[in-house]
Amino acid sequence: MSLAKLNMVQAINLALFEEMEKDPTVLVMGEDVGVDGGVFRVTEGLYDKFGSDRVIDTPLAESGIVGTAIGMAVSGLKPVAEIQFEGFSYMTIDQLAAHASRIRYRSRGTYHCPLVIRAPYGGGVKALEHHSEAVATFYIHIPGLKVVIPSTPYDAKGLLISSIRDPDPVMFFEPKKLYRAYKEEVPEGEYTVPLGVGKKITEGEDLTLIAWGAMVRVCQEAMEQVKDLSVELIDLRTLSPLDDRVIIDSVKKTGRAVIVHEEPRTLGFGAEIIARINEKALLSLEAPVKRVTGFDVPVPLPRLEDYYLPNAAKVADAIKEVAAF
Amino acid sequence: MSVDWLSILDAQGNVDESLEPELDTETLEKFYRTMVLTRMYDDKALKLQRQGRMLTFGSSLGQEATAVGSAFAMKPDDWFFPAFREHGVQIARGIPLSLLYIYWMGSEDANLTLPPKNFPVAIPVSTQVLHAVGAAWAAKLKKQNIASVVYFGDGATSEGDFHEGMNFAGVFKTPTVFICQNNQYAISLPREKQTASKTLAQKALAYGFEGIQVDGNDILAVYSVTLAALEKARSGGGPTMIECFTYRMGSHTTSDDPTRYRQAAEVEEWKKKDPIKRLRIYLEKKGIWDQSREGAMIKEITDEVEKAVKEAESYKPVVENMFKYVYADMPLHLKEQMDELQGFISKRRGDESG
């Protein structure tokens, strides 16, 4: 198995390429994914390799993309549909909530829906309105969907392969801030990162820091500013279904936790994590759990965006505050 | 922007011999029996609902020719995507009556043994149109010689998913047959307030394929036009939209009162166009049906319906299924929640017996 230094876009591209080569039922569809290679170039080269029947440029209609992909998925294909930006994914919610997530349930297993929806998400790239949102919460609230968010090129490839092979519908949100932020070694060929398993990035004793996607990098930067503290950083990787054992075990050890997400605070996933900690590890807590999140406002346009997003300084402040409680 | 209109068997049972399909006696009897069975299934469901033994139910009274005629034009291997009023299609496609009753009595377990290529009902209006296009598209990509048929009502033609589905079907020439059951009302909204288009079928023209109107109470016409559309689809000719012009003789569902939004005189006019009555006259004229056969059939169907209801009412839903079919493998949090519920149930049982 050879290694190459790849950024996240290249790693996702490689995952698609390898899975399409391996499994003829896998196909890619969406707006501008074919000839153009995708607006972020994630599907670059796939059209030339696999042709217009497997790399499909669709009309501009998000519900249409997801709804027809559902019909394909129940017919034994494995569509990987791209929604160009998370802010345009709202039109897909009806098809996802009313059908993709329930086909197994409604049909009592007669049909299932092996579908992946890929969408770039998140802020910090100085984009237009609707191009900087983090919307995972909407999808986490739909039973029957899985929600996956990678934070590294290596995980992006392994998690996407697992998502494509998963028999249930998966929302795969890609942190566009990290698309080309850095490169790391990514193996060519077969490897998977399992869904539903969070990853402990650092071991620590004093405090548990929980994040996913682009916020993992922010947390790592923040940890540079609190080197005197021993912080256990957890990247959840799969938000739904959440296997909370990695969180609960860690909080039982450290007694303190900070959760970081760029989604708005109210009913953001941090709220659920705090509820789980209360249900399963309350008596281990030495301090109230703190959230560093986006505010409960629409994501502002770029000139105020940096105030909206969690950053290393905000996270470091929260770590110090919780550690000192 | 005009579309063709097809009718073969008029309301008085007179047939246009130039268009009459060649059907053997056995097939015609099957058409007739399935229409009557659908009506008696519906009628029983309404009675059960009134007695609190069924959920809210949408009867297909008056629309039997549209359902049964199109269903018998399909092959078992063709995909069928219903809305929620396609009881006649489900029956014609061989879904056991008892399963249909189990569903409308309130359990998804009815779908545990759903025969292949039959999709479960879709309650949100027009959403299933996209699935049918996707399934047809998949068949085309896999080079399978099958088509996909989707049913929806006149109201669905105002929804975005209908238009997106029609557009995708036109662009990718998918083997999809769109069957619009224009029963003239979307709950209370009459057809002319749904769209300013002169016909619903003409919407297909905007998407680059053929639309046709057919007398939806004429089973020979519905059968013929669906058969032709399916053959065209399977041979690479792309999609067709068929507007079946019919009438919902009953209420939208058991939850509404149609006298609030339509005139009794209008209903009386449509009664004269009854789809079952005209087929019976046609069969009698052909000398293949009479009163004694009718009586024997009604008795047989009555027993069949009663037996299905009995079976359905004796079915006990499985609590575990509520958690079992959310994902292929039950995740940890659902195991915890299932244990919580089962703990509650056994505690209650313990309390009651103690």
Image: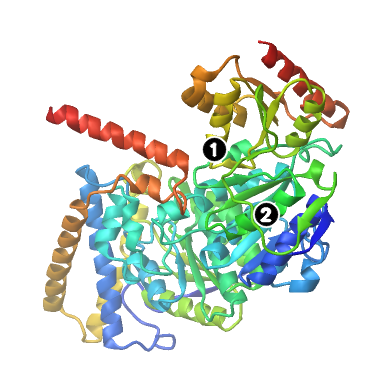
- Pointers 1 and 2 within a single chain: yes
State which chain disc 2 sits on: A
Q: Amino acid at mark 1?
A: His
Local packing at callout 2 (Cα closer than 10 Å; few below 14, some 14-19, many 20+) is: many
Label 1 to label 2, Cα distance in Å?
Answer: 24 Å
Q: Quadrant of the C terminus of chain A?
A: top right
Residue labelled with disc 1:
A141
State whether residue B79 appears in this view: yes
User: Could you tell me which residue is drawn at 67 percent across and 32 percent down?
Assistant: A203
Local packing at callout 1 (Cα closer than 10 Å; few below 14, some 14-19, many 20+) is: some
Question: How many numbered markers are drawn?
Answer: 2
User: Could you tell me which residue is drawn at 15 percent across and 60 percent down?
Assistant: B306
B139 over A316 or under it: above or below: below
Which residue, as the protein is rendered here, is positioned at the far top?
A325
User: Could you tell me which residue is drawn at 39 percent across and 49 percent down?
Assistant: B324
Q: Position of residue A112 (x, y in %)?
A: 48, 59
A312 over B217 or under it: above or below: above
Which residue, as the protein is rendered here, is positioned at the far right?
A303
Q: Position of residue A16 (x, y in %)?
A: 71, 62
Give whichever of A82, B58 is nearer the camera: A82
Give whichever of B23, B196 is nearer the camera: B23
Q: Earlier in the sequence, mark 1 or mark 2?
A: 1
State whether residue B211 appears in this view: no
Residue labelled with disc 2:
A158
Q: Amino acid at mark 2?
A: Gly
B82 over B278 or under it: above or below: above
Q: Which mark is residue A28?
A: none
Mark 1 or 2, closer to the camera: 2
